[in-house]
Amino acid sequence: MEFHQLVLAQTIEEAYEAVKDRGATILGGATWLRITAKHLDYAVDISDLGLSYIRETGDRIEIGATTTLRSLETDSLLASRYGGLFARTLGHIVGVQLRNLSTLGGSLAGRYGFSDVATLFLALGAQLDIYPSGLMNLEDYMAAADHGPHLIRSVSIPAHPVPAAFQTIRITHSDFPILNVAAAYTNRGWRIAVGARPGRAQLAKSAMQALGTEAKPGADLIARAAQLSAEELGFGKDIRADEEYRKTVCPVLVRRAVEEASR
Amino acid sequence: MKITCTINKEQKVLELQAGEMLAEVLRRYGYTEVKVGCDTGSCGLCTVLVDGKPVLSCSYLAHRAEGRTITTIKGKEKEAAEFAAFLTAEGADQCGFCSPGFALTVLAMKEELAHPNEADIRHYLAGNLCRCTGYEGQMRAIHKYLEARHE
């Protein structure tokens, strides 16, 4: 890559100014950016902002934007609340060496269709702390067309254990997903996110509603919800699979995810 | 721009362009044991250790190495040679182009995981591709190397 100008931001205000006033591109892990952008006029590096942390804050676990995927995978606090969910979900992403570079904030800010991270965090009801605007649900962040100049400062998820599961289908273990699904049972009911359709992750709201409020829904309810997920979401074609294939696989993964999370 | 970092226990001042990746810079400064394969972050050939953690140097922005400790396979020469003997014995080296990155990842795994089982090893090494061996010889070599280290 080539940067015409690089700003090594020391404060979030400085980083924001570079984005707002000069249209600077924010450097997270830059692992995907380096493939897709060969030249940047302005780049701003936020790796010195002290945003690599995972900590409990009240009833949430707060994760700094520059925390690596490998840190999420191996963190003891997350493991104590979510078991092996993060390791199982993120362990598909290329290899340890890449996951030591890719960051949570970069994965979400890119709103990539292929993202396993976005699907998982969407199901967990993640909330973003965005500079300068404040808190925003990941669901709204994923859905909006454009947010204007901003930086993700941190991401939070419930601190109390949430039964959750992640399912995916891929051509090989570490390839991009053909489809991914995450299901989580929160205080208010079920959340089901489906990503790599190949569009960006979305909640399957009819399916979530169909599951009701019980932590252990019956087989009939799960089958109904799984079918609804395929009917309500849009699917498409890319190099890995066509629309019909994804639509057929979706209810299977949703059923498996809900069954696993409700065990 | 200039950065100061430690490479294989020697302090170095490196001159680089903003946006350059660590693999390009290391090779330009003569660390040609760092191999570049896919150059898209997929194959693991370019693995180096930054502060002890394995990273893809083809995808690591070089300016971020400021103040950090970088280890290439030459910085782990003795341990790498020990492991390489097991690779050779199992016929798992073949063309050898992936070996520097592969061996460094194995050494990093050994530091990070106390007693990795078969699944742990395969998982940890999923980011290291080899187009010669089919991986079975490498797996045998790793198991025997780890067993020998524990004895």
Image: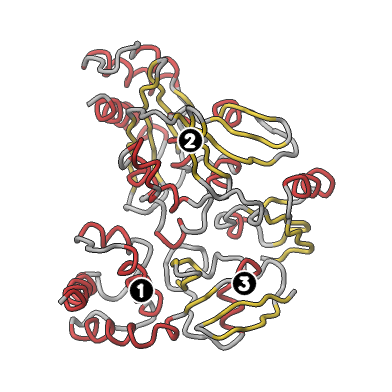
Q: Amino acid at mark 3?
A: Gly
Check whether the beta carbons of the residues at disc 1 and disc 2 lie within 8 A of each other.
no
x, y (%) of residue A168? Answer: 34, 40
Give the residue number, with chain letter if any, for mark 1.
Answer: B102
Residue pictured at 72% horizontal, 76% vertical: B2
Q: Amino acid at mark 2?
A: Ile
How far separated are the C-alphas under marks 3 and 1? 25 Å
Check whether the beta carbons of the residues at disc 3 and disc 1 lie within 8 A of each other.
no
Give the residue number, with chain letter if any, for mark 3.
Answer: B67
Give the residue number, with chain letter if any, for mark 2.
Answer: A61
Between residue A194 and residue B101, name the one nearer to us. Answer: B101
Q: Write down the quadrant of residue B133 in the picture.
A: bottom left
Tell me which chain the residue with mark 2 is part of: A
Residue pictured at 43% horizontal, 53% vertical: A70
How far separated are the C-alphas under marks 2 and 3? 30 Å
Residue pictured at 84% horizontal, 46% vertical: A21
x, y (%) of residue B46? Answer: 47, 73
Whether marks 2 and 3 lie on the same chain? no
Image quadrant where one finds the C terminus of chain A = top left
Tell me the mark number nearer the camera, choosing from 1 and 2: 2
Q: Is residue A82 visible?
A: yes
Between residue B65 and residue B119, name the one nearer to us. Answer: B65
Q: Residue furthest right?
A: A21
Q: Mark 3: which secondary structure?
A: loop
Q: Along the horizontal axis of the image, is A250 left or right of A38? A: left
Between residue A149 and residue B91, name the one nearer to us. Answer: A149
